[in-house]
Amino acid sequence: MFQFRNLLENRADLLAELPGIHGRMDAEYDRVAEAHGFHCSGCEDNCCLTRFFHYTLVEYLYLMKGFAGLDPSLQSQLIQQAVRVNAQVDAAVAAGEVSRVMCPVNMDGLCVLYDFRPMICRLHGIAHQFRHPSGKIISGPGCAAFESRRDPAAAIALDRTPFYRDMAVLEGRVREKTGIREKIKMTVAQMIAATGEILS
């Protein structure tokens, strides 16, 4: 695993554009959610129980930047929790079951790395679409809670296309500047646990 600490200390410029992209995601999510009168608070179908994989180096580095700013005792707690979560998820997958295990950075219902959370954590939950590079429009529904509450008269969905495009461009620049070619397919729990291995 690459040494994210050195990258964070020496190439902070790599992450400078990401908050702007995330901000635009949040604003568009809020706009579409508001059009449907939808909000996530109090939802029993908590998306933090869903196993999401993340694929970009830049968002991994950004999450680790947030993690590095936490109190060391909290870092240790999150690492231990991440290891437990990974074990529970692995056991569920081995048994052929759908894993529903709370993300290790969700504490008392709140994400302790909320400002640093990855793209899918920001965009999940509401009806969406995006234009595939082939030109085909691909659409997807929202979560069960959204679909049960959505306003049929509000013919609006979140267009992920500009965010996917912006993330791909930024990811390409980060990969070029760092020389890192290693592919990423990790959950937040796996990222946190891997950080514990690096720091130990």
Image (cartoon, rainbow, N blue to C red):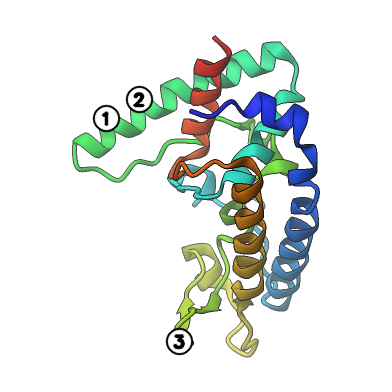
> Which numbered disc, 1 or 3, marks the residue that appears first in the sequence?
1
Q: Is residue 192 visible?
A: yes
In the figure, residue 14 lies in which quadrant?
Answer: top right
Position of residue 96 relative to residue 8, above or below, is below
Residue 190 versus residue 99: which sits nearer the camera?
190
Residue on which the image places disc 3: 136
Residue at (49, 25) in percent of width and height: 194
Residue 61 versus residue 138: which sits nearer the camera?
61
Instruction: Point out which mark residue 87 bears.
Output: 2
Residue 42, how many percent across, how many down? 63, 50
In the figure, residue 78 lies in which quadrant?
Answer: top right
Residue 3, how many percent across, how many down? 59, 25
Residue on which the image places disc 1: 91
What amino acid type is highlighted by mark number 3? Lys
Q: CA distance from mark 1 to mark 3?
A: 38 Å
Please report contact status of discs 1 and 3: CB closer than 8 Å, yes or no: no
Residue 146 versus residue 14: which sits nearer the camera?
14
What amino acid type is highlighted by mark number 2? Ala
Q: CA distance from mark 1 to mark 2?
A: 6 Å
Instruction: Point out which mark residue 145 bears.
Output: none
Secondary element under disc 1, as helix, strand or loop, is helix
Residue at (58, 86) in percent of width and height: 152
User: In what quadrant of the picture does the C terminus appear?
Assistant: top right
